Amino acid sequence: MATKKTSMFTLTERLTISAAATDTFATIDLGSYVDVGDRQALQVHSVDFIFQGATAGGEVVGSIGNGNQVMVQVTDLNRGSMVFADDRALVASGIVAVDAGGSPTQDFDLYPDNYGKGSDDGRYVVNDQLYITGATNNQISDVNVTIRVNASIVSLTAKDFMAIAIQSTAADN
């Protein structure tokens, strides 16, 4: 299906969420990696989310506050808000919650952000941007989320590229 053009590399973006109950947005530009004419796509192997407080060494638990949560999603279409897990545009999601006792957890975010280790494993993206949406449910001070996308560039067959592009367009509706 795909022929690798590069080894795996990492794209990173930091999202600072500073307002409670308000969606915060960022993007990762893929224009240099995706080329329609050459049927070149980005193959996403895994996505990692790193939650930090207001500073690089800041405590995330204190920034989120007891009984609150922060959620982040990466999509390949601009939805303008959080999406349900059955949305075809969803690439990855991450969540951290702090219970009333001050203990953090990520247990209930079950979306598979790791697509496997094989050369054919991965999520193919043919759009020119990845869209990041972050939100919190309650009072917070600044929370920084670093999104690390482990990917490679691949060439697809004409049929495979067209199928992925049609699926992406259909997901836009």
Image (tube, helix red, strand yellow):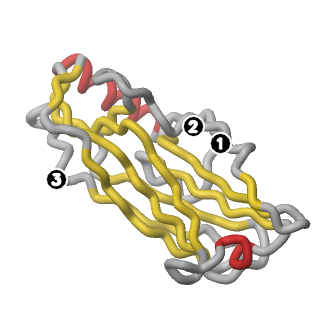
| Alpha carbon distance from label 3 to label 1 | 29 Å
**Residue furthest toward the left?**
38
Q: Residues within 10 Å of mark 2 (few under 14, many from 20)?
A: few
Could you tell me residue 152's position as x and y percent? 24, 39
Query: Could one spot residue 145 in this view of the protein?
Result: yes
Up-down: is 121 above or below 127?
Answer: above
Q: Is residue 112 left or right of residue 100?
A: left
Q: Earlier in the sequence, mark 3 or mark 2?
A: 3
Name the residue carrying label 1: 84
Hey, what amino acid is under mark 1? Phe
Which is more N-terminal, label 1 or label 3? 3
Residue in the image at 65% along x and 79% along y: 19
Q: Amino acid at mark 3?
A: Ser
- At x 19% / y 47%, what residue is drawn? 33
Q: Where does label 3 land, which residue? A: 32
**Image quadrant containing the N terminus:** top left
Q: Nearer the viewer, residue 10 or 90?
A: 10
Residue 124 in the image, given as x and y percentages of width and height: 33, 33
Check if mark 3's residue and mark 2's residue have beta carbons within 8 Å. no
